[in-house]
């Protein structure tokens, strides 16, 4: 009996201890350790993930290297029938075109959604104003890319699936631009140097709040200049505001860093280093001719002619001849199909191949991107550069807008900055003295300013492999003047594509929204249709 009483006593004490312990640790025990709660939410890591997804959206097989690189005639691909690069160089669909079409859309919205999580969870936290501003900049950067590539798109009702809205309306591009500019303005005005800076920033800005602010104003300038043909007064208003706020300074190029060792390699490089891609992808005749005509010092840095023979052309460890006089751009729109009228051997001025017998290659004399500069998977992905910002300011000054220095000064800054930006790919690729000398000896010609400025913009963004921006600004400015490819069966109707169609699932998953988007396109959901500002 005494033993039984002792047992119940110990059992009761144990129950009391267990009960007390459960009450004490109730919240911890009943909290899913795999889920974040607001007080444990670290906004910084959502920022870095947003940056990474933006990099995925603008590089590699997500789209630009397979579409805009050839549309803007930065790259040229002598392909065989059915190869996925026919989407780019010849405007001809391949078996995976629909997948490529939707990849930029999906990844850019994913990037915007990650940035938006910061704003949802930290909107009222005064200590996070700078991280919230950075998140807004990332959202706008993604929406700018989406709407410039596709046209009208979800904006005001986007990213609301958590609230049950899975069928967002499509906003008109004009309204999207108004919202983006206002959102940027509010975010940049909120930045407070006394508050916390981003601590997981994987861009070249390194969490520096002052640099983020200048990045934001340069993005505002980019948006403003998109409007010059549809609303010049609004374009001027926002361009002048951007300049007054302070755009990127010399050497401040904004790019997303890659980390290949941990699975975050550059998408463009990963695509290019696929064996068949490495062999087929060359610089276009349009770009190489421009660099040679201008005696541009970047030519010997970015281009090389492979050593003779098919094996050497495919050898990713074997550098080619970088002598400027030897460089030869490959014409766009030709293939490697035997007996084809569009076979590269039938192109005007065909120089002949290299090698003999089984080691022969018909494209051996055409320039490819330099291995020393472009083959590292740790290459950064550029979002916007000081050079782009200065060239846009040069155009604004040409239009007699109030942006400080005159057009010639901004242009010289842009030329110099574009040359030096290559050093992010390969340290010491071009010296300050070389850039200074070239900019001084190639001043702006006032009688041909718009063409000169925007052709320089095209070359700079193309050389930095920001293919989407090279194509988008070409659409806006019309420079350089490009001759479209008219390859059989092309989806451009003999014209350079002006947009990507909406992802195929949009018509069935969100038919009302999709119908709104298509209704405002000039020609419907086609590659040849123009978005609102593309006049």
Image: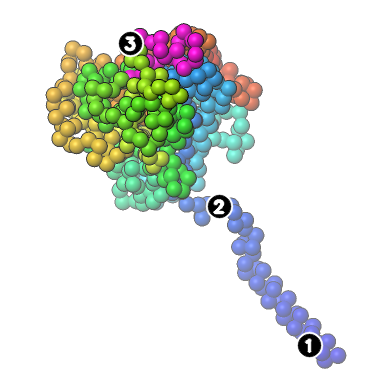
The residue furthest front is 357
Residue at image position (27%, 31%) is 301
Residue at image position (20%, 22%) is 295
Quarter location, residue 160: top right
Magenta residues: mostly which secondary structure?
loop
Query: In the image, which is nearer the foreground, mark 1 or mark 3?
Result: 3
Relative height, residue 104 to residue 71 (above, below): below
The picture places residue 51, in percent across and down from the top left corner, at: 43, 40
Taking the magenta stretch, the answer to whether it contains residue 335 is yes
As drawn, the label of residue 349 is 3
Residue picked out by circle 1: 6
The picture places residue 368, in percent across and down from the top left corner, at: 35, 27
Taking the magenta stretch, the answer to whether it contains residue 342 is yes
Q: Can I make out residue 135 in this image? A: no
The answer to which of marks 2 and 1 sits earlier in the sequence is 1
Residue at image position (69%, 73%) is 18
Query: In the image, which is nearer the foreground, mark 2 or mark 3?
Result: 3
Relative height, residue 409 to residue 208 (above, below): above
Q: In this view, does 185 lie to the left or right of 50?
A: left
Secondary structure found at label 1: helix
Q: Can I make out residue 157 in this image? A: yes
Relative height, residue 215 to residue 87 (above, below): below
Quarter location, residue 321: top left
Residue range of the region highlighted in magenta in the rendering: 329-349
Residue picked out by circle 2: 36
Quarter location, residue 420: top left
């Amino acid at each position: 009996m005494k033993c039984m009483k002792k047992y119940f006593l110990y059992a009761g004490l144990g129950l009391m201890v267990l009960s007390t312990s459960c009450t004490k640790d109730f919240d911890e025990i009943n909290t899913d350790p795999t889920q974040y709660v607001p007080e444990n939410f670290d906004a910084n890591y959502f920022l870095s993930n947003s940056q990474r997804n933006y990099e995925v959206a603008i590089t590699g097989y997500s789209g630009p290297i397979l579409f805009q690189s050839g549309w803007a005639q930065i790259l040229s691909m002598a392909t065989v029938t059915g190869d996925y690069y026919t989407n780019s160089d010849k405007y001809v669909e391949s078996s995976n075109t629909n997948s490529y079409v939707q990849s930029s859309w999906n990844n850019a919205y994913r990037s915007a959604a990650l940035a938006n999580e910061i704003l949802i969870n930290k909107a009222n936290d005064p200590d996070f104003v700078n991280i919230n501003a950075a998140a807004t900049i990332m959202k706008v950067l993604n929406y700018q890319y989406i709407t410039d590539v596709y046209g009208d798109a979800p904006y005001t009702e986007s990213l609301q699936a958590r609230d049950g809205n899975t069928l967002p309306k499509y906003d008109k591009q004009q309204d999207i631009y108004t919202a983006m500019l206002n959102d940027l303005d509010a975010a940049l005005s909120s930045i407070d140097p006394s508050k916390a800076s981003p601590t997981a920033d994987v861009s070249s800005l390194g969490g520096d709040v002052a640099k983020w602010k200048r990045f934001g104003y340069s993005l505002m300038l980019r948006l403003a200049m998109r409007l010059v043909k549809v609303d010049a007064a609004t374009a001027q208003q926002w361009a002048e505001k951007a300049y007054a706020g302070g755009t990127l300074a010399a050497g401040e190029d904004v790019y997303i860093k890659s980390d290949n060792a941990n699975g975050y390699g550059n998408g463009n490089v990963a695509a290019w280093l696929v064996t068949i891609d490495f062999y087929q992808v060359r610089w276009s005749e349009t770009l190489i001719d421009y660099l040679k005509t201008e005696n541009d010092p970047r030519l010997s840095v970015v281009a090389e002619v492979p050593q003779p023979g098919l094996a050497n052309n495919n050898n990713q460890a074997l550098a080619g001849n970088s002598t400027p006089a030897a460089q030869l751009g490959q014409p766009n729109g030709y293939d490697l199909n035997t007996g084809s009228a569009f076979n590269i051997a039938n192109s005007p001025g065909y120089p002949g191949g290299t090698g003999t017998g089984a080691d022969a290659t018909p494209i051996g004399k055409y320039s490819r991107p330099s291995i020393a500069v472009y083959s590292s998977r740790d290459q950064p992905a550029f979002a916007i550069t000081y050079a782009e910002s200065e060239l846009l300011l040069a155009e604004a000054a040409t239009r007699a807008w109030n942006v400080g220095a005159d057009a010639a000064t901004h242009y010289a800054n842009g030329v110099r900055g574009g040359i030096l930006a290559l050093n992010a790919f390969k340290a010491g690729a071009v010296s300050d003295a070389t850039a200074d000398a070239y900019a001084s000896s190639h001043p702006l010609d006032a009688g041909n300013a718009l063409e000169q400025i925007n052709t320089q913009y095209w070359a700079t963004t193309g050389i930095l492999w920001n293919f989407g921006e090279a194509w988008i600004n070409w659409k806006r400015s019309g420079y350089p003047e490009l001759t479209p490819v008219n390859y059989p069966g092309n989806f451009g109707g003999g014209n350079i594509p002006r947009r990507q169609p909406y992802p195929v699932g949009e018509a069935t998953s969100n038919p009302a929204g999709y119908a709104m988007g298509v209704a405002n396109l000039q020609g419907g959901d086609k590659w040849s249709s123009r978005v609102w500002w593309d006049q």
